[in-house]
């Protein structure tokens, strides 16, 4: 398995590998049965109902998790980018069957780790594996909070409040009031579960009201 310098840095900067020394990385990846997989845009990384026994870390590219409902438009559950995890909550469950699909949106490289080897204490009681277990529990909590943020957008009663909740959360995550969102208008409308025309209309109104400025996917919060 060949990893670029940037990919190794992504792994070491991830919450799961926090406090792990660079010289220990290869040994730990071998211990965890690490496997690198690549996906083309539009291809499925995980299918709904599929049994998931691995935790994935996005090293390059973008993906999204979706809930499919027959002929209806798919509902975007979460957006995945460099450093995002797949299957963390599933690894902590007993059933391991995915309630969502995960689809690559761009050329994607994902590092997969055996969930069983990740959550099973090392027989030698090594310190690095103990750190991984602690970090894994932190990652489970973070994923739960991320889902709560998603629900926080969906339960807002108006389009303006949905948009405000989404943009405010992104601003807080990025630590700046000016940022680029990872969605085009159609995907943003889908993510917020609103009509695209209603979203475009509300964005124009919010701009006219002096709440935001934007150009394509670049936003600046003024009075939110």
Image: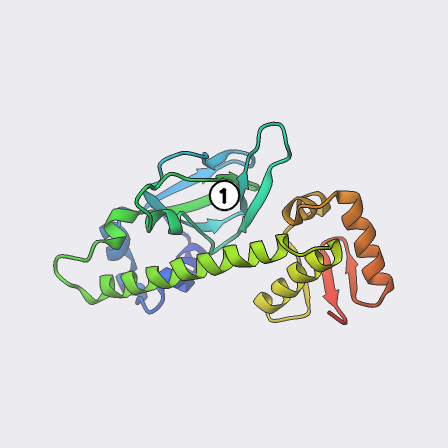
Is 87 above or below relative to 169? above
Q: Position of residue 95 (x, y in %)?
A: 33, 41
Number of marks in picture:
1
Q: Is residue 214 toward the left or the right of residue 4 in the image?
A: right
Q: Is residue 46 toward the left or the right of residue 16 in the image?
A: right
Q: Is residue 87 toward the left or the right of residue 94 in the image?
A: right
Q: Residue furthest left?
A: 124
Q: Nearer the viewer, residue 85 or 91?
A: 91
Which residue: 69% across, 56% down?
162
Q: Position of residue 102 (x, y in %)?
A: 49, 40
Which residue: 52% across, 35% down?
40
Q: Residue furthest top?
A: 71
Tell me the quadrant of the picture where the N terminus can be found: top left
Q: Report which residue position mark 1 lands on.
A: 108
Q: Position of residue 209 (x, y in %)?
A: 85, 65
Q: Secondary structure at mark 1?
A: strand
Which residue: 49% across, 49% down?
60
Dot 1: within a 10 Å radius of its alpha carbon, few (fewer than 14), some, or many (20 or more) residues? Answer: many
Q: Is residue 95 toward the left or the right of residue 143 in the image?
A: left
């Amino acid at each position: 398995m060949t990893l670029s310098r940037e990919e190794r840095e992504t792994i070491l900067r991830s919450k799961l590998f926090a406090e792990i020394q660079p010289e220990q990385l290869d040994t730990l990846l071998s211990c965890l049965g690490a496997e690198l997989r690549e996906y083309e845009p539009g291809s499925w990384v995980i299918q709904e109902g599929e049994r998931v026994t691995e935790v994935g870390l996005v090293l390059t590219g973008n993906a999204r998790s979706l809930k499919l409902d027959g002929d209806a438009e798919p509902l975007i559950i979460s957006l995945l980018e460099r450093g995002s995890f797949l299957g963390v909550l599933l690894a902590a469950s007993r059933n391991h069957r995915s309630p969502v699909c995960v689809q690559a949106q761009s050329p994607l490289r994902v590092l997969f780790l055996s969930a069983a080897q990740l959550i099973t204490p090392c027989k030698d009681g090594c310190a690095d594996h103990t750190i991984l277990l602690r970090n894994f529990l932190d990652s489970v909590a973070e994923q739960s909070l991320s889902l709560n943020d998603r629900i926080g957008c969906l339960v807002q009663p108006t389009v303006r409040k949905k948009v405000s909740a989404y943009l405010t959360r992104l601003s807080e995550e990025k630590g700046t009031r000016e940022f680029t969102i990872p969605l085009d208008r159609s995907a943003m409308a889908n993510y917020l579960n609103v009509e695209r025309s209603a979203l475009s209309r509300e964005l124009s109104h919010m701009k006219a009201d002096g709440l935001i400025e934007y150009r394509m996917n670049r936003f600046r919060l003024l009075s939110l």
